[in-house]
Amino acid sequence: MKNQIWHQNITGIEGVAEAYDQFGTSLTVGDFNGDGKDDLAIGVLFETVGTVKNAGAVNVIYGSNIGLTSSGNQIWHQDSPGIQGVAETSDYFSKSLAVGDFNGDGKDDLAIGVLYEDVGTIIDAGAVNVIYGSNTGLTSTKNQLWHQDSPGIAGVAEAYDSFGRSLAVGDFNGDGKDDLAIGVLYEDVGTIINAGAVNVIYGSNTGLTSTGNQIWHQDSPGIQGVAEKSDYFSNSLAVGDFNGDGKDDLAIGVLFETVGTIIGAGAVNVIYGSNTGLTSSGNQIWHQDSPGIQGVAEKSDYFSNSLAVGDFNGDGKDDLAIGVLYEDIGTIINAGAVNVIYGSNTGLTSTGNQIWHQDSPGIQGAAEAFDGFGTSLAVGDFNGDGKDDLAIGVPYETVGTISGAGAVNVIYGSNTGLTSIGNQIWHQDSPGIGDVAEASDYFGSSLTVGDFNNDGFADLAIGVPGEDVGSISNAGIVNILYGSAIGLTA
Protein backbone atom coordinates (compact mmCIF):
# COMPACT_ATOMS: atom_id res chain seq x y z
CA MET A 1 0.00 0.00 0.00
CA LYS A 2 1.00 3.64 -0.35
CA ASN A 3 3.47 5.10 2.12
CA GLN A 4 2.11 7.42 4.79
CA ILE A 5 3.09 10.51 6.77
CA TRP A 6 1.88 11.11 10.32
CA HIS A 7 2.12 14.18 12.55
CA GLN A 8 0.00 15.95 15.15
CA ASN A 9 -1.73 18.16 12.59
CA ILE A 10 -3.12 15.20 10.64
CA THR A 11 -6.91 15.34 10.85
CA GLY A 12 -8.11 13.29 13.79
CA ILE A 13 -4.73 12.85 15.49
CA GLU A 14 -4.64 13.96 19.10
CA GLY A 15 -2.34 16.82 20.04
CA VAL A 16 -1.23 19.85 18.06
CA ALA A 17 2.02 20.23 16.14
CA GLU A 18 4.18 22.82 17.88
CA ALA A 19 7.63 24.17 17.22
CA TYR A 20 10.38 21.87 18.46
CA ASP A 21 8.01 19.13 19.66
CA GLN A 22 10.14 16.59 17.76
CA PHE A 23 7.32 14.14 17.14
CA GLY A 24 9.07 10.89 16.22
CA THR A 25 12.08 11.19 18.54
CA SER A 26 11.42 7.62 19.68
CA LEU A 27 9.31 4.85 18.13
CA THR A 28 8.10 1.38 19.05
CA VAL A 29 5.49 -1.12 17.90
CA GLY A 30 3.06 -3.48 19.64
CA ASP A 31 -0.40 -4.94 19.36
CA PHE A 32 -2.04 -3.05 22.21
CA ASN A 33 -5.61 -4.23 21.51
CA GLY A 34 -4.81 -7.82 20.50
CA ASP A 35 -6.48 -7.56 17.07
CA GLY A 36 -3.50 -8.96 15.17
CA LYS A 37 -2.54 -5.63 13.62
CA ASP A 38 0.50 -3.83 14.95
CA ASP A 39 0.12 -0.36 16.42
CA LEU A 40 2.65 2.48 16.49
CA ALA A 41 3.75 4.42 19.58
CA ILE A 42 5.47 7.72 18.81
CA GLY A 43 7.50 9.69 21.31
CA VAL A 44 7.03 13.47 21.35
CA LEU A 45 9.95 14.34 23.57
CA PHE A 46 9.41 18.08 23.92
CA GLU A 47 5.59 18.10 23.99
CA THR A 48 4.12 20.85 26.15
CA VAL A 49 1.40 19.44 28.42
CA GLY A 50 -0.96 22.25 29.28
CA THR A 51 1.50 24.97 30.24
CA VAL A 52 4.22 22.52 31.27
CA LYS A 53 7.02 22.82 28.72
CA ASN A 54 8.94 19.78 27.52
CA ALA A 55 6.98 17.42 29.74
CA GLY A 56 6.78 14.94 26.88
CA ALA A 57 4.06 12.68 25.51
CA VAL A 58 3.36 9.58 23.43
CA ASN A 59 0.96 9.38 20.50
CA VAL A 60 -0.45 5.94 19.67
CA ILE A 61 -1.81 5.19 16.20
CA TYR A 62 -3.59 1.89 15.69
CA GLY A 63 -3.24 -0.59 12.84
CA SER A 64 -6.02 -1.96 10.64
CA ASN A 65 -6.48 -4.09 7.54
CA ILE A 66 -5.57 -1.03 5.49
CA GLY A 67 -2.62 0.04 7.65
CA LEU A 68 -2.28 2.73 10.28
CA THR A 69 -5.40 4.83 10.73
CA SER A 70 -6.37 7.75 12.95
CA SER A 71 -9.37 5.79 14.25
CA GLY A 72 -9.14 5.44 18.03
CA ASN A 73 -5.71 7.06 18.28
CA GLN A 74 -4.52 8.25 21.69
CA ILE A 75 -2.12 10.62 23.40
CA TRP A 76 -0.58 9.77 26.76
CA HIS A 77 1.40 11.82 29.27
CA GLN A 78 1.72 12.04 33.06
CA ASP A 79 -1.31 14.31 33.30
CA SER A 80 -3.51 11.86 31.40
CA PRO A 81 -6.40 10.79 33.67
CA GLY A 82 -5.34 8.03 36.03
CA ILE A 83 -1.69 7.89 34.97
CA GLN A 84 0.84 7.84 37.79
CA GLY A 85 3.22 10.76 38.12
CA VAL A 86 2.77 14.43 37.30
CA ALA A 87 3.84 16.24 34.14
CA GLU A 88 6.76 18.51 35.01
CA THR A 89 9.00 20.82 33.03
CA SER A 90 11.66 18.93 31.06
CA ASP A 91 10.67 15.46 32.30
CA TYR A 92 11.20 14.12 28.76
CA PHE A 93 8.43 11.51 29.03
CA SER A 94 9.03 9.25 25.97
CA LYS A 95 12.83 9.52 25.80
CA SER A 96 12.73 5.74 25.38
CA LEU A 97 9.94 3.31 24.54
CA ALA A 98 9.56 -0.47 24.65
CA VAL A 99 6.73 -2.96 24.25
CA GLY A 100 6.02 -6.32 25.86
CA ASP A 101 3.24 -8.45 27.29
CA PHE A 102 4.14 -8.16 30.95
CA ASN A 103 1.03 -9.94 32.27
CA GLY A 104 0.69 -12.60 29.56
CA ASP A 105 -2.86 -11.60 28.59
CA GLY A 106 -2.15 -11.48 24.84
CA LYS A 107 -2.25 -7.68 24.63
CA ASP A 108 0.96 -5.73 24.47
CA ASP A 109 1.85 -3.14 27.09
CA LEU A 110 3.89 0.05 26.72
CA ALA A 111 6.90 1.06 28.84
CA ILE A 112 7.84 4.76 28.68
CA GLY A 113 11.13 6.18 29.92
CA VAL A 114 10.84 9.50 31.78
CA LEU A 115 14.45 10.52 31.70
CA TYR A 116 14.43 13.47 34.08
CA GLU A 117 11.62 12.49 36.43
CA ASP A 118 12.20 13.75 39.96
CA VAL A 119 11.75 11.03 42.59
CA GLY A 120 10.60 12.82 45.71
CA THR A 121 13.22 15.53 46.20
CA ILE A 122 15.81 13.69 44.10
CA ILE A 123 16.10 15.65 40.89
CA ASP A 124 16.34 13.92 37.52
CA ALA A 125 16.62 10.43 39.00
CA GLY A 126 14.43 9.06 36.21
CA ALA A 127 11.46 6.71 36.10
CA VAL A 128 9.45 4.42 33.82
CA ASN A 129 5.68 4.54 33.31
CA VAL A 130 3.97 1.32 32.21
CA ILE A 131 0.57 1.43 30.50
CA TYR A 132 -1.22 -1.87 29.94
CA GLY A 133 -3.06 -3.09 26.86
CA SER A 134 -6.65 -4.30 26.70
CA ASN A 135 -9.31 -5.29 24.18
CA THR A 136 -9.78 -1.59 23.48
CA GLY A 137 -6.09 -0.69 23.42
CA LEU A 138 -3.92 1.02 26.00
CA THR A 139 -5.77 1.95 29.19
CA SER A 140 -4.82 3.62 32.46
CA THR A 141 -6.17 0.62 34.41
CA LYS A 142 -3.45 -0.77 36.70
CA ASN A 143 -0.76 1.44 35.17
CA GLN A 144 2.52 1.60 37.07
CA LEU A 145 5.43 3.93 37.79
CA TRP A 146 8.83 2.39 38.51
CA HIS A 147 12.07 3.90 39.79
CA GLN A 148 14.94 2.85 42.06
CA ASP A 149 13.05 3.93 45.17
CA SER A 150 10.04 1.78 44.27
CA PRO A 151 9.54 -0.78 47.07
CA GLY A 152 11.84 -3.75 46.65
CA ILE A 153 13.71 -2.48 43.57
CA ALA A 154 17.48 -2.89 43.62
CA GLY A 155 19.51 0.33 43.73
CA VAL A 156 18.77 3.75 45.14
CA ALA A 157 17.39 6.76 43.28
CA GLU A 158 20.08 9.40 42.97
CA ALA A 159 20.22 12.77 41.25
CA TYR A 160 20.88 12.57 37.51
CA ASP A 161 20.87 8.74 37.37
CA SER A 162 18.72 8.77 34.18
CA PHE A 163 16.81 5.60 35.10
CA GLY A 164 14.89 4.82 31.92
CA ARG A 165 17.44 6.22 29.45
CA SER A 166 17.12 2.96 27.48
CA LEU A 167 14.58 0.14 27.58
CA ALA A 168 14.31 -3.38 26.19
CA VAL A 169 11.88 -6.23 26.66
CA GLY A 170 12.30 -10.01 26.62
CA ASP A 171 11.30 -13.18 28.40
CA PHE A 172 14.52 -13.85 30.26
CA ASN A 173 13.20 -16.78 32.33
CA GLY A 174 10.97 -18.38 29.70
CA ASP A 175 7.79 -18.19 31.80
CA GLY A 176 5.66 -16.66 29.03
CA LYS A 177 5.53 -13.19 30.60
CA ASP A 178 7.78 -10.49 29.28
CA ASP A 179 10.34 -8.78 31.48
CA LEU A 180 11.67 -5.21 31.34
CA ALA A 181 15.32 -4.15 31.23
CA ILE A 182 15.89 -0.51 32.20
CA GLY A 183 19.09 1.38 31.50
CA VAL A 184 20.42 3.60 34.30
CA LEU A 185 23.03 5.41 32.27
CA TYR A 186 24.62 7.53 35.00
CA GLU A 187 24.39 5.05 37.86
CA ASP A 188 27.39 5.18 40.18
CA VAL A 189 28.80 1.74 40.97
CA GLY A 190 30.30 2.06 44.43
CA THR A 191 32.51 5.12 44.12
CA ILE A 192 32.78 4.84 40.35
CA ILE A 193 30.91 7.79 38.87
CA ASN A 194 28.61 7.23 35.87
CA ALA A 195 29.69 3.65 35.32
CA GLY A 196 26.11 2.71 34.44
CA ALA A 197 23.81 -0.18 35.28
CA VAL A 198 20.70 -2.07 34.19
CA ASN A 199 17.69 -2.85 36.37
CA VAL A 200 15.58 -5.85 35.35
CA ILE A 201 11.96 -6.15 36.49
CA TYR A 202 10.18 -9.43 35.81
CA GLY A 203 6.66 -10.01 34.51
CA SER A 204 3.93 -12.06 36.18
CA ASN A 205 0.23 -12.85 35.84
CA THR A 206 -0.46 -9.40 37.31
CA GLY A 207 2.18 -7.54 35.32
CA LEU A 208 5.60 -6.26 36.33
CA THR A 209 6.51 -7.00 39.94
CA SER A 210 9.53 -6.37 42.13
CA THR A 211 9.79 -10.10 42.90
CA GLY A 212 13.19 -11.38 41.81
CA ASN A 213 14.28 -8.07 40.27
CA GLN A 214 17.97 -7.62 39.51
CA ILE A 215 20.60 -4.98 38.92
CA TRP A 216 23.55 -5.60 36.58
CA HIS A 217 26.78 -3.72 35.93
CA GLN A 218 30.37 -4.56 35.05
CA ASP A 219 31.26 -5.14 38.70
CA SER A 220 28.43 -7.65 39.16
CA PRO A 221 29.94 -11.01 40.15
CA GLY A 222 31.17 -12.92 37.12
CA ILE A 223 30.40 -10.23 34.53
CA GLN A 224 33.15 -9.50 32.04
CA GLY A 225 34.71 -6.06 32.05
CA VAL A 226 35.30 -3.66 34.92
CA ALA A 227 33.11 -0.73 35.95
CA GLU A 228 34.96 2.47 35.11
CA LYS A 229 34.16 6.15 35.33
CA SER A 230 31.82 7.29 32.55
CA ASP A 231 31.61 3.91 30.82
CA TYR A 232 27.88 4.50 30.27
CA PHE A 233 26.97 0.82 30.57
CA SER A 234 23.36 0.64 29.27
CA ASN A 235 23.44 3.49 26.75
CA SER A 236 21.68 1.00 24.45
CA LEU A 237 19.86 -2.27 25.06
CA ALA A 238 18.56 -5.07 22.84
CA VAL A 239 17.07 -8.50 23.43
CA GLY A 240 17.29 -11.74 21.46
CA ASP A 241 17.69 -15.47 21.84
CA PHE A 242 21.27 -15.78 20.64
CA ASN A 243 21.68 -19.47 21.52
CA GLY A 244 18.18 -20.68 20.59
CA ASP A 245 17.39 -22.10 24.04
CA GLY A 246 13.98 -20.41 24.32
CA LYS A 247 15.11 -17.85 26.92
CA ASP A 248 15.86 -14.33 25.83
CA ASP A 249 19.28 -12.80 26.34
CA LEU A 250 20.24 -9.18 26.96
CA ALA A 251 22.79 -7.16 24.97
CA ILE A 252 24.02 -4.03 26.76
CA GLY A 253 25.90 -1.22 25.06
CA VAL A 254 28.87 0.27 26.92
CA LEU A 255 29.37 3.37 24.83
CA PHE A 256 32.58 4.76 26.33
CA GLU A 257 34.24 1.46 27.24
CA THR A 258 38.01 1.64 27.08
CA VAL A 259 39.42 -1.27 25.08
CA GLY A 260 42.98 -1.82 26.22
CA THR A 261 44.24 1.76 26.22
CA ILE A 262 41.75 2.97 23.59
CA ILE A 263 39.37 5.42 25.24
CA GLY A 264 35.76 5.46 24.09
CA ALA A 265 36.13 2.56 21.67
CA GLY A 266 32.93 1.00 23.01
CA ALA A 267 31.80 -2.53 23.75
CA VAL A 268 28.76 -4.75 24.24
CA ASN A 269 28.14 -7.02 27.22
CA VAL A 270 25.82 -9.99 26.65
CA ILE A 271 24.04 -11.64 29.59
CA TYR A 272 22.20 -14.88 28.88
CA GLY A 273 18.77 -15.98 30.07
CA SER A 274 17.95 -19.14 31.99
CA ASN A 275 15.06 -20.81 33.81
CA THR A 276 15.74 -18.42 36.69
CA GLY A 277 16.24 -15.31 34.57
CA LEU A 278 19.41 -13.51 33.55
CA THR A 279 22.57 -15.12 34.88
CA SER A 280 26.29 -14.41 34.60
CA SER A 281 26.88 -17.95 33.32
CA GLY A 282 28.48 -17.79 29.88
CA ASN A 283 28.28 -13.99 29.64
CA GLN A 284 30.37 -12.27 26.97
CA ILE A 285 31.93 -8.95 26.06
CA TRP A 286 32.37 -7.90 22.43
CA HIS A 287 34.28 -5.05 20.77
CA GLN A 288 36.22 -4.48 17.57
CA ASP A 289 39.39 -5.95 19.07
CA SER A 290 37.60 -9.17 20.07
CA PRO A 291 39.28 -12.10 18.26
CA GLY A 292 37.99 -12.42 14.72
CA ILE A 293 35.69 -9.37 14.77
CA GLN A 294 35.94 -7.08 11.76
CA GLY A 295 37.18 -3.53 12.27
CA VAL A 296 39.66 -2.17 14.77
CA ALA A 297 38.90 -0.52 18.09
CA GLU A 298 39.70 3.18 17.80
CA LYS A 299 39.34 6.16 20.09
CA SER A 300 35.75 7.44 20.31
CA ASP A 301 34.32 4.95 17.78
CA TYR A 302 31.26 4.52 20.03
CA PHE A 303 30.77 0.84 19.19
CA SER A 304 27.28 0.12 20.60
CA ASN A 305 25.74 3.54 20.00
CA SER A 306 22.73 1.51 18.80
CA LEU A 307 21.74 -2.16 18.93
CA ALA A 308 19.18 -4.32 17.15
CA VAL A 309 18.45 -8.04 16.99
CA GLY A 310 17.17 -10.27 14.19
CA ASP A 311 17.64 -13.64 12.52
CA PHE A 312 19.36 -12.54 9.32
CA ASN A 313 20.19 -16.06 8.07
CA GLY A 314 17.02 -17.83 9.18
CA ASP A 315 18.81 -20.43 11.32
CA GLY A 316 16.59 -19.93 14.38
CA LYS A 317 19.27 -18.15 16.42
CA ASP A 318 19.15 -14.40 16.76
CA ASP A 319 21.98 -12.21 15.54
CA LEU A 320 23.17 -8.85 16.87
CA ALA A 321 23.63 -5.64 14.84
CA ILE A 322 25.82 -3.02 16.51
CA GLY A 323 26.02 0.61 15.42
CA VAL A 324 29.49 2.15 15.44
CA LEU A 325 28.54 5.78 15.15
CA TYR A 326 31.95 7.37 14.62
CA GLU A 327 33.73 4.61 12.71
CA ASP A 328 36.18 6.04 10.19
CA ILE A 329 35.84 4.54 6.70
CA GLY A 330 39.31 4.72 5.21
CA THR A 331 40.17 8.40 5.49
CA ILE A 332 36.53 9.47 5.90
CA ILE A 333 36.18 10.45 9.53
CA ASN A 334 33.13 9.52 11.58
CA ALA A 335 31.14 8.13 8.65
CA GLY A 336 29.73 5.30 10.76
CA ALA A 337 29.37 1.55 10.35
CA VAL A 338 27.45 -1.46 11.64
CA ASN A 339 29.01 -4.69 12.92
CA VAL A 340 26.91 -7.86 12.77
CA ILE A 341 27.66 -10.84 15.04
CA TYR A 342 25.77 -14.07 14.39
CA GLY A 343 24.13 -16.42 16.87
CA SER A 344 24.77 -20.14 17.24
CA ASN A 345 23.96 -23.05 19.54
CA THR A 346 26.53 -21.63 21.95
CA GLY A 347 25.47 -18.00 21.62
CA LEU A 348 27.07 -15.15 19.72
CA THR A 349 30.23 -16.14 17.87
CA SER A 350 32.70 -14.36 15.62
CA THR A 351 32.09 -16.93 12.87
CA GLY A 352 30.85 -15.18 9.75
CA ASN A 353 30.66 -11.75 11.37
CA GLN A 354 30.35 -8.73 9.09
CA ILE A 355 30.90 -4.98 8.96
CA TRP A 356 28.69 -2.75 6.80
CA HIS A 357 28.95 0.88 5.74
CA GLN A 358 28.10 2.99 2.71
CA ASP A 359 31.39 2.11 1.01
CA SER A 360 30.82 -1.63 1.42
CA PRO A 361 30.76 -3.26 -2.04
CA GLY A 362 27.37 -2.83 -3.68
CA ILE A 363 25.78 -0.75 -0.89
CA GLN A 364 23.90 2.34 -2.03
CA GLY A 365 25.13 5.76 -0.96
CA ALA A 366 28.67 6.92 -0.28
CA ALA A 367 30.42 7.18 3.06
CA GLU A 368 30.83 10.82 4.06
CA ALA A 369 32.20 12.48 7.18
CA PHE A 370 29.69 12.66 10.04
CA ASP A 371 26.89 10.87 8.13
CA GLY A 372 25.77 9.05 11.29
CA PHE A 373 25.36 5.68 9.55
CA GLY A 374 24.15 3.41 12.34
CA THR A 375 22.61 6.12 14.53
CA SER A 376 19.45 4.00 14.65
CA LEU A 377 18.73 0.38 13.74
CA ALA A 378 15.60 -1.70 13.25
CA VAL A 379 14.94 -5.24 12.08
CA GLY A 380 12.07 -6.88 10.22
CA ASP A 381 11.25 -9.26 7.37
CA PHE A 382 10.25 -6.70 4.75
CA ASN A 383 9.93 -9.21 1.87
CA GLY A 384 8.45 -12.13 3.79
CA ASP A 385 11.18 -14.62 2.88
CA GLY A 386 11.71 -15.82 6.45
CA LYS A 387 15.01 -13.97 6.90
CA ASP A 388 15.15 -10.71 8.79
CA ASP A 389 16.40 -7.55 7.12
CA LEU A 390 18.24 -4.59 8.65
CA ALA A 391 17.25 -0.92 8.39
CA ILE A 392 20.03 1.55 9.22
CA GLY A 393 19.39 5.20 9.99
CA VAL A 394 21.74 7.75 8.42
CA PRO A 395 20.12 10.94 9.76
CA TYR A 396 22.92 13.32 8.78
CA GLU A 397 23.10 12.09 5.18
CA THR A 398 23.30 14.80 2.56
CA VAL A 399 20.64 14.26 -0.11
CA GLY A 400 21.88 15.96 -3.27
CA THR A 401 23.08 19.24 -1.83
CA ILE A 402 20.69 19.19 1.14
CA SER A 403 22.72 18.85 4.33
CA GLY A 404 21.28 16.76 7.16
CA ALA A 405 18.22 15.66 5.21
CA GLY A 406 18.81 12.09 6.31
CA ALA A 407 18.35 8.65 4.80
CA VAL A 408 17.82 4.99 5.64
CA ASN A 409 19.80 2.11 4.16
CA VAL A 410 18.11 -1.31 4.04
CA ILE A 411 20.18 -4.50 3.76
CA TYR A 412 18.32 -7.75 3.17
CA GLY A 413 18.82 -11.14 4.79
CA SER A 414 19.51 -14.43 3.04
CA ASN A 415 20.45 -18.03 3.81
CA THR A 416 24.00 -16.80 4.39
CA GLY A 417 23.05 -13.68 6.34
CA LEU A 418 22.93 -10.05 5.31
CA THR A 419 23.88 -9.45 1.69
CA SER A 420 24.17 -6.41 -0.56
CA ILE A 421 21.81 -8.02 -3.09
CA GLY A 422 18.74 -5.85 -3.53
CA ASN A 423 19.78 -3.31 -0.89
CA GLN A 424 18.00 0.04 -0.88
CA ILE A 425 18.42 3.62 0.23
CA TRP A 426 15.39 5.73 1.15
CA HIS A 427 14.98 9.44 1.80
CA GLN A 428 12.29 12.05 1.30
CA ASP A 429 13.39 12.69 -2.28
CA SER A 430 13.08 9.00 -3.17
CA PRO A 431 10.41 8.56 -5.88
CA GLY A 432 6.95 8.31 -4.39
CA ILE A 433 7.91 9.14 -0.82
CA GLY A 434 5.76 11.69 0.96
CA ASP A 435 7.22 15.14 1.67
CA VAL A 436 10.52 16.61 0.47
CA ALA A 437 14.09 16.36 1.73
CA GLU A 438 15.06 19.52 3.61
CA ALA A 439 18.10 20.63 5.56
CA SER A 440 18.30 19.26 9.09
CA ASP A 441 15.18 17.08 8.80
CA TYR A 442 17.21 14.13 10.17
CA PHE A 443 15.13 11.48 8.42
CA GLY A 444 16.12 8.17 10.04
CA SER A 445 16.87 9.47 13.53
CA SER A 446 14.60 6.76 14.92
CA LEU A 447 13.28 3.53 13.39
CA THR A 448 10.88 0.76 14.29
CA VAL A 449 9.22 -2.13 12.51
CA GLY A 450 5.73 -3.65 12.60
CA ASP A 451 3.08 -5.22 10.39
CA PHE A 452 0.52 -2.41 10.48
CA ASN A 453 -1.83 -3.89 7.85
CA ASN A 454 -1.48 -7.56 8.84
CA ASP A 455 -0.38 -8.65 5.36
CA GLY A 456 2.56 -10.74 6.54
CA PHE A 457 5.23 -8.26 5.46
CA ALA A 458 7.03 -6.04 7.96
CA ASP A 459 6.64 -2.29 7.54
CA LEU A 460 9.13 0.43 8.51
CA ALA A 461 8.36 3.56 10.55
CA ILE A 462 10.94 6.33 10.18
CA GLY A 463 11.22 9.25 12.57
CA VAL A 464 11.90 12.68 11.07
CA PRO A 465 12.08 14.84 14.21
CA GLY A 466 13.45 17.92 12.47
CA GLU A 467 10.65 18.07 9.88
CA ASP A 468 8.71 21.31 9.72
CA VAL A 469 4.92 20.90 9.64
CA GLY A 470 3.76 23.79 7.52
CA SER A 471 5.36 26.82 9.12
CA ILE A 472 5.93 25.03 12.43
CA SER A 473 9.66 24.46 12.84
CA ASN A 474 10.90 21.04 13.96
CA ALA A 475 7.45 19.77 14.90
CA GLY A 476 8.45 16.36 13.55
CA ILE A 477 6.75 13.65 11.51
CA VAL A 478 6.89 9.91 10.93
CA ASN A 479 7.13 8.33 7.47
CA ILE A 480 5.76 4.79 6.98
CA LEU A 481 7.07 2.47 4.25
CA TYR A 482 5.11 -0.72 3.70
CA GLY A 483 6.63 -4.12 2.99
CA SER A 484 5.80 -6.36 0.05
CA ALA A 485 7.02 -9.51 -1.69
CA ILE A 486 9.80 -7.41 -3.21
CA GLY A 487 10.66 -5.62 0.02
CA LEU A 488 9.97 -2.06 1.09
CA THR A 489 8.17 0.01 -1.51
CA ALA A 490 6.81 3.53 -1.83
Image (cartoon, helix red, strand yellow):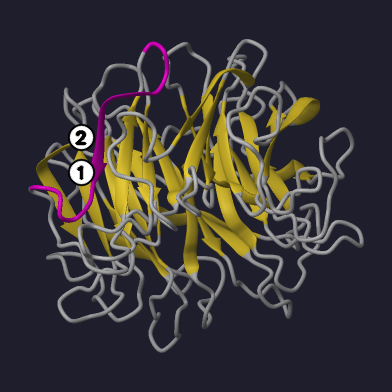
Q: Quadrant of the C terminus?
A: bottom left
Identify which residue is drawn at 69% across, 78% down.
53
Quarter-wise, where is residue 308 in the image?
Answer: top left
Residue type beneath disc 1: Ile
Q: Position of residue 4 (x, y in %)?
A: 30, 60
Position of residue 281 measured from the top left corner of the image (x, y, whole percent)? 59, 15
The residue that disc 1 covers is 411
Magenta range: 345-361
Q: Is residue 299 left or right of residue 438?
A: right
Q: How many marks?
A: 2
| Residue situated furthest bottom in the rendering | 471
Q: Determine whether label 2 and label 1 are within 8 Å by CB.
A: yes
The residue under label 2 is 418
Of residues 107 and 26, the one drawn nearer to the viewer in this rendering: 26
Amino acid at dot 2? Leu
From this viewpoint, is residue 201 visible? Answer: yes
Q: Quadrant of residue 381?
A: top left
Q: Does the magenta run of residues contain 349?
A: yes
Residue 41 shown left or right of residue 356 in the figure: right
What residue is drawn where x is 27% and y is 69%? 369
Residue at (23% x, 65% y) in the render: 332
Q: Does residue 324 belong to the magenta stretch?
A: no
Circle 1: element type:
strand
Q: Earlier in the sequence, mark 2 or mark 1?
A: 1
Element on which disc 2 rests = loop
Residue in the foreground of this view, choosing between 127 and 193: 193
